[in-house]
Image (tube, rainbow, N blue to C red):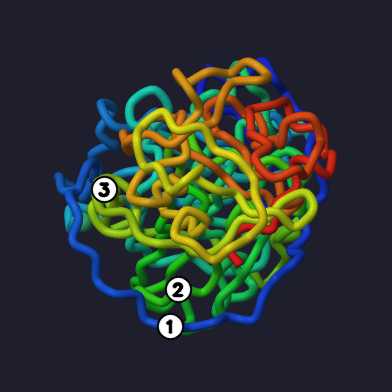
Amino acid sequence: MRKRVAVGALALALGLAAAPLTAIGAQQPVQYQQAAQAGKVIWEDNFDGSAGQRVNSSKWNTETGDNNGNNREHQYYTDSAGNAALDGSGNLVITAKKENPANYNCWYGRCQYTSARINTSGKFTTTYGKVEARMKLPRGKGIWPAFWMLGQDIGSNPWPNSGEIDIMEFLGHEQNKVYGTIHGPGYSGSGGVSGNYTGPNFADGFHTFAVEWAPNSIKWLVDGNVFFQTTPASVNGNRWVFDKPFFVILNLAVGGEWPGYPDASTQFPQQMLVDYVRVTDTSGGNGGGNNPGVVKSGRVTGLGGKCLDVPWANSASGTPIQIVSCNGNAAQNWTFYTDGSIRALGKCLDVSNSGKADGTVIQLWDCNGTGAQKWAVSGANDVVNINADKCLDIKGNTSADGTRVQLWTCTGAANQKWNAFV
Ligand SMILES: [Ca+2]
C-alpha cells in the first residue's frame, strides 16, 4: 500500500506524486503452519544498547523531511533521538509526536507531527531470504507504521519498476489487521497486489512479521502463519520485478490518503517498538541453492499442444530443446524449482552462453545457478528468462514436430504461450 518515498539522498530528486492507496485484492487469511526452516542469519539488528542511543549508522540511514508529500503524509521525519532511539531493553522505539520543535515546513504548511524513518539502502540489501521483524505496533486513527522493502536500483530505475515489497503495514484504527503487498510496473499504488491477516490486537503485544522470498514466490507470515502468497501469476501478466537486491525500511507515518488523518481520538505520542530485524538465508531450504524446493512439475505445452522436449532424451549438456507431440516420456517431464530453474532429466533449461540476443539457442545444461537458468512463468503464460528478460519462443511460429525453441523478445504471440507444468 505504500507509495515509493524518498530514500535518503538517493531518491530525493525524484519527487514522485502520491497516488491514492486503497486496499484491494485483499484475501481471506489462509492459515497453515510453515515448517521451521534452518537457515543462516545474514543480517540482523537486535537493537541492543543503552537507552536513548540512536540506531547504528553502519546499518541504517536516517531519512529526514516530509517525504516529499508522498501519500499525503503529515509527519516530518527527523534524526532526533526523540523520534528514534533504543530503549535500553533491546528495542528500537520509533515515536510519533504531535509537535514541531524546529519550525519544520511540510508540503501542506507548518508540520504538525514529527516521527522517524530508517532504511538500509547502500548498507544492506538482499535478494530472496526470510526478512522478519518482531514488533509491537502503535494505535490510533491516522497512525501508519510499516516494515517494507524497495529495490536498491530505485535511483536509476524509478518506482514502481524498481519494485516494492510491503512486509507489514498497519492502520492504527484497525488494530487486529495487518497487510502484505507488492508493487511493480502495472500494479502499483491502489493497484498493488495485497493480502491481509486478521489476528490479535497488534498494539497490545509483540508479534513477528515476515516474508519468505524465493524466486517466483513471496509468502507473508504473521507469527509463523503464512497468510498470503504471490507468484509471477499474481501480477496479471505484468512483469515480476523481485529477482534483484532490495533494502529494508522501518517507518512510522502520521496521516495519509490510505489511513486517513489523526482525529480527536488519536493520542500522542505513539510508539512502534522493534525488538529485532533479521534476514535469514533460506536458500538451503525452500529458497533455491543446491537443494531448491519444487514449485510444480509436469508437461510444458505450447503451440499446437506440442510438448517441450529433450530430443531423444539425450541429457548431454548442449542438447537443444524442441517441441514434439506429447508422449509422456521423462524427456517431456519438466520441474519448476524455487531457485527459478526448470529441469528435466536432472539438467537445467539453459540459455546458451547466458545470451540475451533474439535467436539464442535454448539447451539442456548442467544446473549452475546462473541467470541463464532462471525462469519466471508469468500470469500471461509467458516463460521468461530472468537474465535476458526475454521469452521462450518456438522458432518460425510452427508447431511441426522437431521445431527448436529459442530466446526471443516477448511479443505476446501464440508461439510464446505455454501451458506450463500441467
Ligand atoms: Ca532486541
Task: Give the number of marks.
Answer: 3
Q: What residue would you read off at disc 1?
A: 32
- Amino acid at the residue labelled 3: Asp
Verify CB contact (< 8 Å) between mark 2 and mark 1: yes
Image location (x, y in percent) of residue 236: 76, 54
Q: Earlier in the sequence, mark 1 or mark 3?
A: 1
**Horizontal arrangement in the rendering, residue 350 relative to residue 133 (left or right):** right
Work out how far the residue at label 2 is from the one at label 1, CA to CA, in angstroms.
6 Å
Question: Which of the 4 image quadrants contains residue 132?
Answer: bottom left
Q: What residue would you read off at disc 3?
A: 281
Q: Is mark 1 within 8 Å of ligand 1?
A: no
Image location (x, y in percent) of residue 297: 49, 64
Crowding at label 3, few (<14), some or many (≥20) Cα neighbours within 10 Å? many
Q: What residue would you read off at disc 2?
A: 226
Q: Earlier in the sequence, mark 2 or mark 3?
A: 2
Image location (x, y in percent) of residue 171: 62, 65
Disc 3, SS? strand
